[in-house]
Image: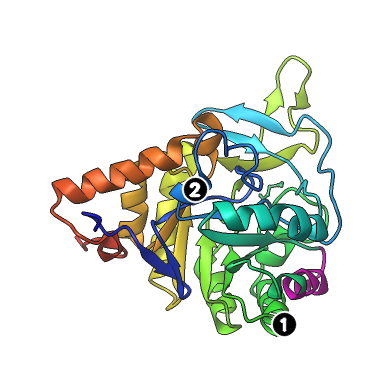
Amino acid sequence: MKKWDLTVNVAGVKFPNPVIAASGVYGFGEYYTDLYPPSLMGGISCKGLTINKRVGNPPPRVAETPAGMLNSVGLQNPGIDVFIKTHLPRLKKEANVIIANIAGDTPQDYAEIACRLDETDVDMLELNISCPNVKKGGAAWGISTEGASLVTKTVRAVTKKPLMVKLTPNVTDITEIAKAVENEGADAVSLINTLLGMRIDIKTRRPILHRNVGGLSGPAVFPIAVRMVWQVANAVNIDVVGMGGINSAEDAVEMMLAGAKAVQIGTAIISDPLAPLKIIGGLEHYMDINGMKRIAEISGTVRPH
Ligand code: SIN
């Protein structure tokens, strides 16, 4: 028997530990299996899937920033059918919880993808209504309670899979969006996706990113993510998964204290592919020095002043 119980439950799905690879940084696991088995992580949120293949935005589509990065990938992915036929069977053998992150131009696009995934081994759906890098769809749905409700309701009607909705921080009050998707049957919310940012090359006087603006992630956004997770966890009764600049076990603990049941690791994996394993090891150390048995106990236990 293991000394520490790292298991967590999100939306009725049991994860062996609370550390999940965030969508977009881990592909479908294919680039990392030589380094370590994906089964060491609690789960994987796959790259955002659309009905048809997307080549993504023209380059440059990443830019460095102090303590972070901007991306404007544009939902590059092979399309839902290739995922189901090629990637999912392999992932099923290699990974624990498999989360399919899905995106579309219209609510019907999201529903069609959800329908196709309903008959598969995917464990959970993550509705991406927060991608800031596409002309149609993406964050356009996530910035209003009406849009967020409509996509959630349309997908909820066609799937029995546990449904998590990934929220954008680019709104005035994220708790209103979280409450709206909870009311339409979401089982969990994940947050935060990236913050809209921009960089300009002072020699050429042109924006660095081809699409001018992109999503900021990395340690720079961490305090904003903690604040939003804390606000949302206090506003809804469904589970919250926290992400945004988590770089260490201490960050993961902080995010869980704010109210997250589990955490997703994004940009940290780009600079250090072993980051998830270091965070899991660090959580065990934290439990050891604090005499804890179950990591799930810490969620939402931040104390008032
Ligand atoms: C992208 O593919 O542009 C990033 C995905 C996202 O921010 O949701």
Which amino acid type is shown beneath numbered disc 1?
Val
Q: Provide the secondary structure element on which disc 1 rests.
A: loop
Q: How many C-alpha atoms fall within 10 Å of the one at disc 1: few (<14), some, or many (≥20)?
A: some
Whole-percent x and y of residue 290?
Answer: 15, 51
The part of the image, by quadrant, that contains residue 150 is bottom right
Instruction: Identify residue for label 2.
Output: 244
Task: Read off the magenta span.
Answer: 105-115
Tell me which label, 2 or 1, sits earlier in the chain.
Answer: 1
The part of the image, by quadrant, that contains residue 230 is bottom left
Whether pointer 2 and pointer 1 mark residues with C-beta atoms closer than 8 Å, the reply is no
Q: Does residue 25 appear to the left or right of 224 in the view shown? A: right
Whole-percent x and y of residue 169?
Answer: 56, 56
- Residue 232 seen from this side: no
The part of the image, by quadrant, that contains residue 151 is bottom right
Whole-percent x and y of residue 3?
Answer: 21, 54
Query: Is 292 in the magenta?
Result: no
Instruction: Identify residue for label 1.
Output: 158
Above or below, 31 against 137 in this view is above
Magenta region's main secondary structure?
helix
Which amino acid type is shown beneath numbered disc 2?
Gly
Q: Provide the secondary structure element on which disc 2 rests.
A: loop
Whole-percent x and y of residue 111?
Answer: 76, 74
